[in-house]
Image (cartoon, rainbow, N blue to C red):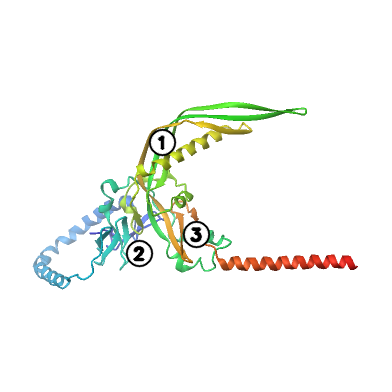
Amino acid sequence: MADTIKCPQCSANLIFNPDTQKLECAFCGGAFDPSQIESVVEELTTDKKIGATDQAQAFEGQKDSVFEAEADNAEFNVSEQQGVVEDNSDKTEFVCNACGARVVTDSHTSATFCAFCGSPALVGQRLAENFRPKYLIPFSVSREKAEEKFITWAKGGRWTPMNFVSQKNIEKLTGLYVPFWLFDYNIKMDVTGKGTTSSVSGNIKTIHEYEVTCKGPMKFGGVPFDGETRIDDELMEAIEPFHMDKMIPYDYKYLPGFFADRYDLDPDGLKDRAVKRGREYINQYINSKVKKYDTFSIKQNNSVFTEIKADYALLPVWFMSYKYLGKYYYFAVNGQTGEVAGKLPISPLKKLIFFFVLLAIIAVIVRAGLALYLGGTFG
């Protein structure tokens, strides 16, 4: 059974608003701090118990007929399914507790919307055990802001198709909590390199060479790698960084209104990439410390990773796919910073128009030059 977070005041579904960082009700206007929603529910429930006592006896006399009516209704809801055999090994069914619809989703989706009434329904059982994240960064960029960022970015493309930035395409923008593994490194740094400086005396230039050795312990923390094979790694790296100081312990109350994938790639499958990026960080650190040299090059990097560990976290991303001329293009907006990334499609029509405009400009220049030349010759 899927679950939602209900408004303590009117029982409608609550949605997390990135702008206010609160769970909000679209019906009664209630707004609640996610970390305090349980205490609010308990307080209101206690107040209602006083009035509910007087109604208990009246309900007691009616309950038999109510249960019979529910049983009658249930009998008409039973139907036999037959005919088509479908492979459901990678699918999961849940029941929407807002409208009663049964919704099928793939096995990697841990939070989704009901396709019938739009209710945000949480599949909490799939975030249990080893699939439960340790941390989460809540969305702080709202859908409206994400749309503005994306439109501004997309319009900056010289060859972007004219009909690309349309309301139809923008509606596909989806708030998605992407599964990430956050790697921490303990490193025994051991790097040697060569630095050079130069001096000039009269007409003589002298090159001075220095052997540089860098050794000692190093630490890097919270280096993110997405654990979802269906999302392009370069796209996720392009919208970094995420501000890890805003990360909180995982709390499902920040999920309503958004999708959330679970990882299908564990830390072992990311270890090679993690080590490669760790070595790149070492090189960047070394290069930042040797700016006194005119030139510097690393000869050997024998650094040893003494400890590597990873924590599972959900990070906020606005995601969109777009099909143009039979090819899919993918775009992402960092749900915390608003950074936009993706590869824009190229419009053949725009390139053709540009070619003819350029050809016309060249023709005018050539004609003007030729006229000037002939005028000078026969003048």
Name the amino acid type tagged 2: Ala
Marked residue nearer the N-terminal end (1 or 3): 3
Secondary-structure class at tag 1: strand
Q: CA distance from mark 1 to mark 2?
A: 45 Å
Between 282 and 257, the residue placed more toward the observer is 282
Task: Give coordinates of residue 83: x percent, y percent.
Answer: 21, 71
- Disc number at residue 185? 1
Please tell me whether residue 345 is drawn above or below residue 240 in the rendered image.
below
Q: Amino acid at mark 1?
A: Tyr
Q: What residue is disc 2 on?
A: 26
In percent of width and height, residue 122 lies at: 29, 57
Q: Nearer the viewer, mark 2 or mark 3?
A: 3
In the rendered image, residue 235, in percent from the top left (x then y), is placed at: 46, 52
Asked whether the beta carbons under mark 1 and mark 3 sit within 8 Å of each other, the answer is: no
Q: Nearer the viewer, residue 229 or 243?
A: 229
Q: Earlier in the sequence, mark 2 or mark 3?
A: 2
Residue sitting at x 77%, y 68%: 367
